[in-house]
Image: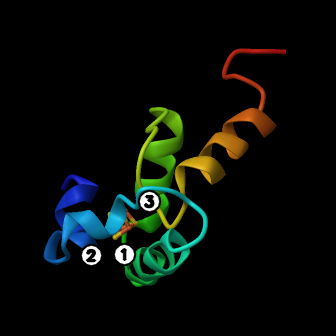
């Protein structure tokens, strides 16, 4: 089974997961999206997919785009030194 089939966000408004920013009023929206992610049975698979695929927008696996970018920068590239 594809992890997407078990996604908790399937029954949510997709707009919730795509805030226009990461600061100010967007913080509340991000926290609402994270609350859905935290009860999602595939949160880890979703976050891993988003980091590995360089997903540039939205909340995936309870992480914002900026948080995922930080994770990618803090890890050596696959096959690297
Ligand atoms: S972790 Fe969040 S964005 Fe990912 S599938 Fe689950 S609810 Fe959707």
| Label 3 beta carbon less than 8 Å to ligand 1 | yes
Q: Secondary structure at mark 2?
A: helix
Name which residue lies at 25% across and 71% down. 9
Q: Nearer the viewer, mark 1 or mark 3?
A: 3
Q: Secondary structure at mark 1?
A: loop
Numbered circle sitting on residue 8: 2
Name which residue lies at 40% across and 84% down. 39
Return the residue at label 1. Answer: 41
Left or right, residue 24 beside residue 26: right
Numbered circle sitting on residue 59: 3
In the rendered image, residue 61, in percent from the top left (x then y), is placed at 47, 62
In the rendered image, residue 49, in percent from the top left (x then y), is placed at 43, 44
Q: Dot 2, how many residues are within 10 Å of its Cα: few (below 14), some (14-19), or many (20+)?
A: some
The image quadrant of residue 18 is bottom left
Name which residue lies at 45% across and 32% down. 53
| Label 2 beta carbon less than 8 Å to ligand 1 | yes
The image quadrant of residue 76 is top right
Q: Secondary structure at mark 3?
A: loop
- Which one is earlier in the sequence, the residue at label 2 or at label 3? 2
Q: Quadrant of the C terminus?
A: top right
Q: Quadrant of the N terminus?
A: bottom left
Name which residue lies at 64% across and 41% down. 69
Q: Nearer the viewer, mark 1 or mark 2?
A: 2
Number of marks drawn? 3
| Label 1 beta carbon less than 8 Å to ligand 1 | yes
In the rendered image, residue 14, in percent from the top left (x then y), is placed at 22, 64
- Tag 1 near tag 2, CB within 8 Å: yes
Q: CA separation, marks 1 and 3?
A: 16 Å
Residue 62 versus residue 68 in the image, above or below: below
């Amino acid at each position: 089974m594809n992890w997407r089939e078990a996604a908790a966000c399937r029954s949510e408004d997709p707009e919730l997961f795509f805030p226009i920013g990461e600061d100010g009023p967007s913080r509340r929206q991000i926290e609402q999206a994270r609350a859905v992610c935290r009860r999602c049975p595939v949160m880890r698979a979703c976050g891993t997919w988003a980091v590995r695929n360089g997903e540039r927008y939205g909340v995936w696996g309870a992480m914002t785009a900026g948080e995922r970018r930080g994770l990618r920068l803090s890890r050596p590239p696959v096959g690297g030194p």
